[in-house]
């Protein structure tokens, strides 16, 4: 994966606008991280293969970056995106990695469903 370059990522996001796509979005502060404090509160969210059409997308430099997908009646967004790539299947994979390289957030867009 490459470190986010806003103009390049924006171009990739624009390529999916107006198309029916599948979204994978997850956040975690514990599943992929090692926490040895029993008082640590572990929280996360996970959606996979939600089909939607977004009107447009926006990448905002918010250290780290925020990626938002504008829907007819709201938004889907991921805060903390640091890296991205387009894989061999044409899927746009975005990730937010913490200071130790562990996954904190993922947002992925595909024209075909993601495997389980």
Image: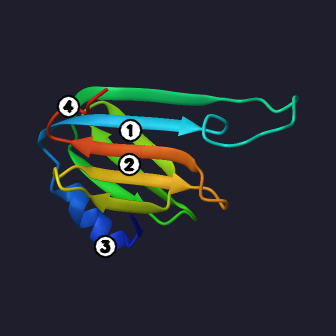
| Disc number for residue 76 | 1
Q: Quadrant of residue 33?
A: top right
Q: Name the foreground residue: 81 vs 31.
A: 31
Q: Earlier in the sequence, mark 2 or mark 1?
A: 2
Q: Name the foreground residue: 65 vs 55.
A: 65
Q: Which residue is mark 3?
A: 7
Q: Earlier in the sequence, mark 1 or mark 4?
A: 1
Q: Quadrant of residue 63?
A: bottom right
The location of residue 23, given as percent across then percent down, is 29, 36
Q: Is residue 55 left or right of residue 79?
A: left
- Determine contact: label 2, label 1, CB under 8 Å: yes
Q: CA distance from mark 1 to mark 4?
A: 18 Å
- Determine contact: label 2, label 4, CB under 8 Å: no
Residue under the image location 51 percent in, 45 percent down:
105
- Determine contact: label 1, label 4, CB under 8 Å: no
- Relative to residue 64, is residue 112 depicted above or below? above
Comparing labels 2 and 4, the label whose residue is closer to the camera:
4
Comparing labels 1 and 4, the label whose residue is closer to the camera:
4
Residue under the image location 26 percent in, 44 percent down:
109
- Relative to residue 38, is residue 35 depicted above or below? below
Q: Which residue is mark 4?
A: 113
- Relative to residue 49, is residue 1 depicted above or below? below
Q: Earlier in the sequence, mark 1 or mark 3?
A: 3
Instruction: Tell which residue pokes out farthest to the left in this image.
Output: 19
Q: CA distance from mark 2 to mark 1?
A: 6 Å
Q: Is residue 14 left or right of residue 44?
A: left
Q: CA distance from mark 2 to mark 4?
A: 20 Å
Q: Earlier in the sequence, mark 2 or mark 4?
A: 2
Q: Which residue is mark 2?
A: 68
- Determine contact: label 1, label 3, CB under 8 Å: no
């Amino acid at each position: 994966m490459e470190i986010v370059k806003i103009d390049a990522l924006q171009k990739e996001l624009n390529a999916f606008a107006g198309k029916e796509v599948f979204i994978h979005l997850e956040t975690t502060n514990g599943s992929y991280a090692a926490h040895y404090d029993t008082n640590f509160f572990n929280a996360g969210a996970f959606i996979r293969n939600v089909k939607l059409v977004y009107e447009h997308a926006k990448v905002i430099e918010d250290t780290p970056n925020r990626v938002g997908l504008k829907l007819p009646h709201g938004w889907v967004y991921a805060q903390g995106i640091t890296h991205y790539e387009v894989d061999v299947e044409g899927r746009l994979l975005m990730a937010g990695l913490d200071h130790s390289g562990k996954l904190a957030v993922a947002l992925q867009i595909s024209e075909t469903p993601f495997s389980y």
